[in-house]
Amino acid sequence: MNGSQIWYIVKHSAGNCEIVPSDKVDDDNLEIIEQWGPFTSEGEAIARRVGLIRAGKCQPV
């Protein structure tokens, strides 16, 4: 993967959140009920996901 990849956090119906690259967000196989982003790095998305878990918006995987 290259450094210019854009990342999103997506919430599934089960309540867990996953970090996915931008090309997977439009994938019809993903059932997304909420999403956050875009983030310029996977590290930033991971940090934001931790915050969402702490805030009770996402369940840990």
Image (cartoon, rainbow, N blue to C red):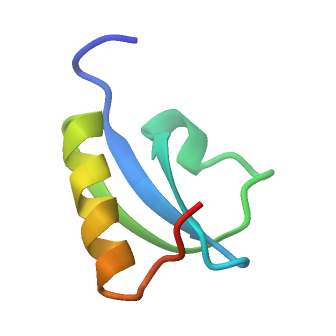
Above or below 11: residue 30: above
Extreme residue toward the right, this view: 29
37 lies above or below 3:
below
Q: Position of residue 3 (x, y in %)?
A: 23, 16
Tag count in the figure?
Answer: 0
53 over 42 or under it: above or below: below
Q: Please give left or right for residue 34 compared with residue 41 in the image.
A: right
Image quarter (top left, top right, bottom left or bottom right) of the N terminus? top left
Relative to 33, is 9 on the left or the right? left
Residue 4, horizontal then vertical, whole percent: 23, 21
Answer with the quarter of the image where residue 16 lies: bottom right
Residue placed furthest toward the top: 2
Q: Nearer the viewer, residue 10 or 14?
A: 14
Which residue is drawn at the image coordinates 40% and 88% (left, top)?
56
Q: Residue at x 54, y 75 (%)?
A: 59
> What is the x, y in percent for residue 50?
30, 64
Residue at image point 62% right, 79% down = 15
For the C terminus, give its image quadrant: bottom right
Residue 46 relative to residue 23: left or right: left
31 over 34 or under it: above or below: above
- Drawn side of residue 43 relative to residue 9, left or right: left
x 31%, y 26%: residue: 5
- Image position, residue 52 (x, y; %): 33, 75
